[in-house]
Amino acid sequence: MIDIAVLGYGTVGSGVVEVIDKNNSSINERTGDQIRIRYVLDLRDFPGDRVEEILVHDFDIILNDPDVKIVVEVMGGVEPAYTFVKKSLLSGKSVCTSNKELVAAHGPELIEIAKKNSVNFLFEASVGGSIPIVRPLNSSLTADRILEIRGILNGTTNYILTQMADEGWEFDKALSTAQQLGYAERNPEADIEGYDACRKIAILSSLAFGKSVNYEDIYTEGISKITARDIQYAEKMKCAIKLLASSTCEDGKYYAMVAPFIVKASHPLYSVNGVFNAIFIRGSEIGDVMFYGSGAGKLPTACAVVADVVDAARHIGKHIRVAWSAEKLELTGVKSATRRFFVRVSGKRVECEEKIRSVFGDAEFIETDEAADEFGFVTPPLPESSFDEKLNSIPGVIGSIRFEEK
Amino acid sequence: MIDIAVLGYGTVGSGVVEVIDKNNSSINERTGDQIRIRYVLDLRDFPGDRVEEILVHDFDIILNDPDVKIVVEVMGGVEPAYTFVKKSLLSGKSVCTSNKELVAAHGPELIEIAKKNSVNFLFEASVGGSIPIVRPLNSSLTADRILEIRGILNGTTNYILTQMADEGWEFDKALSTAQQLGYAERNPEADIEGYDACRKIAILSSLAFGKSVNYEDIYTEGISKITARDIQYAEKMKCAIKLLASSTCEDGKYYAMVAPFIVKASHPLYSVNGVFNAIFIRGSEIGDVMFYGSGAGKLPTACAVVADVVDAARHIGKHIRVAWSAEKLELTGVKSATRRFFVRVSGKRVECEEKIRSVFGDAEFIETDEAADEFGFVTPPLPESSFDEKLNSIPGVIGSIRFEEK
């Protein structure tokens, strides 16, 4: 019998209890032991609920019970999660968490404490919902040098962009629909401004490259400025707009960013729609490997947490190495990366074409039926810094979006 | 320092040595220890080769060296691999293998011996080349009930089918080209008749369902009877022909099969081309999760083996549970499964249409420009057994292919 405690009885926490109840026999069979939920911690009361009898309001009850071997932290946010997790690990309890803020902010410190105490700090559910990605990175792709991670890591923004494309909606309407359906939170900033995807790519990059990528160092741009017109242009080019999170290693330099990109129909991420996530990993020898699945949702995320519980239970007394050191990975600024850009300009193409060609060289021009008073063009590949500079000399620029070449 | 021995210096074996040499520092960093190749076993000599000094012809030298903690078995075939692996595990050495014949034939026995000796028997490279699939199934998808596995598991046949579609070639020409390029073996039977995919789906199904799926019980049909004309019909229907390996759990009954299927353009496996593999797993709560990558090749497969070496090295003295019992999983025959079928008939559609509709009901007819003396039709969904029976009453049948609905 292995006793566990669940910190937080919100969406994911109640999902964890539901999954363990529902799949009890197969989970025990796979664990080789019995998993029992001994406590659920929450500030609220849940009279009549299945957890009523095991609900506690005081974390110390859990901390001081030596029978509790695994703590499931699904409260979200850095505090008090960080304090509870640290105390749990220090007292010899493994921790499984879905909390990306916590992992992005304190990952290497908590891994180190887990190591010293022969327990495990596991966080599969912090990235990619139900998609196995953290364990494959840490335990399956260990023989190769990872050169690139590129993916759609946030289901809310992907749902909004998909709706904008399918229904022709503006951003605000797609966002409010997503909120009504529970795909976006009432305060949607973390999703739509890219902060959620930023923390996730920081975690994956740290695991891939072995050193700490500070999420605050990652250039991050959300989708709140994307308009229905931008998407019309993308469709005219047989492309879609996706919020991509990426990190790459090129000639010993590391780059990481989160931003909307125009991707071609031939791109493998083009057809990842709705709340789905997909993650490409390119290794020096293995080439491209892709993982795809439901990026969020109560039960998919809960299943990822419970799988970590099974793994922690299989490893009582034994720390599984995680090669993520506290040493900081220096990122090179995105401004030195070379790519193409899509630019929208107010005015008539015939009047501006010569000027644009004189500045950018061989640009491709795009006009849509919907907008007679503006046009778009795609630049040849050039460094971001030089793009910014050249763009200043073009009058009437409405906006620009990066172009993903792969 | 952890000494390892490599059994077999063929394609994968030399890849393992190459990967460990090349990525030495990152592999050691991820292991938390130094991996050293102490022996390579092969019947041949390799004068002047990097392994010349560590080459042995006698397995007992490896077996009797207590410093060798991990044995890499990449010889292929059941014997002598089985004998060597069993002896290694019994003497307290972990084994990492790419050998699907060995795993499909003796998996649960070798896992049990590993468990009793506190070592590990790891076989990530036996399925899906570089794609992490065995470890995700055994360690990441453990909280959910797996309902279905469906994939393209053989790169050779997928390459042949892709070439037939792209170039309009007949099977024989595509096969001989694949052989010239090293994508098919000189004796290609194991690939083209589906035996390779059959062993792989047996392994994945056993891991997913926890009991042993005997590969000899799996209905297996290869692609050697697929013609350029069949592919013309598929293209006319905006479909492709793919060799699919699948296993499903429906209402407590288990089904498994390997056969060519017609898949629609909207199907996620439609666009998996060339030597790539892709595997869909559907769980009760997590929905669909997909894994995609290079299904074969020297270095991708070697990387999967070496990742198992890293995992084995991290777990010296500690067995990682694998929930694959020796108890046999009873499969229900595929004849009771319901699906649609594509049928080719010799003759004129107008003369046969009435008869076909009287037997099959609401069939859809397809004619191609290339063949005036025959036509095709797709049946409504019906059980295979009843399809077989009804087909007997249609004169002039040239052949039939199953239709994948998803």
Image (cartoon, coloured by chain):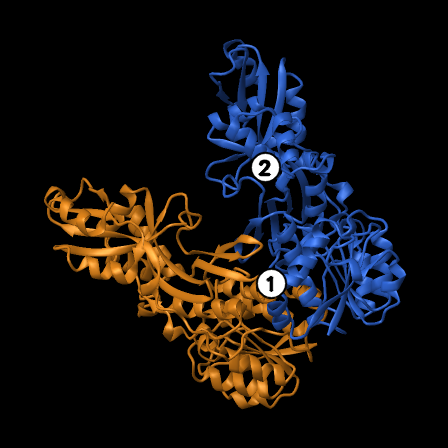
Chain colours: A blue, B orange
State left or right for residue A309 relative to residue A83.
left
Residue A14 figure quarter: bottom right
How far apart marks 1 and 2 lie (CA) works out to 30 Å
* Vertical side of A183 occupied by A106: above or below: below
Residue at x 57%, y 82% (from the top left corner)? B112
Say which amino acid is labelled 1.
Ser
Task: Determine whether label 1 and label 2 are within 8 Å by CB.
Answer: no
The residue that disc 2 covers is A159
Residue found at the very far front of the displayed protein? A48
Residue for badge 1: A140
Residue lying at 28% horizontally and 60% vertically, measured from the top left? B176
Residue B296 visible in rendering: yes
Q: Is residue A23 left or right of residue A95?
A: left
Residue A24 badge: none
Foreground of the two, B6 or A155: A155
Tell me where residue A2 appears, x and y as whole percent: 74, 72
Q: Is residue A323 above or below residue A394?
A: below
Does A138 sit left or right of A45 as displayed? left
Q: Which residue lies at the image location 89% right of the left edge and 61% below the top edge?
A: A60
Q: Residues within 10 Å of mark 1 (few under 14, many from 20)?
A: many
Quadrant location of residue A164?
Answer: top right
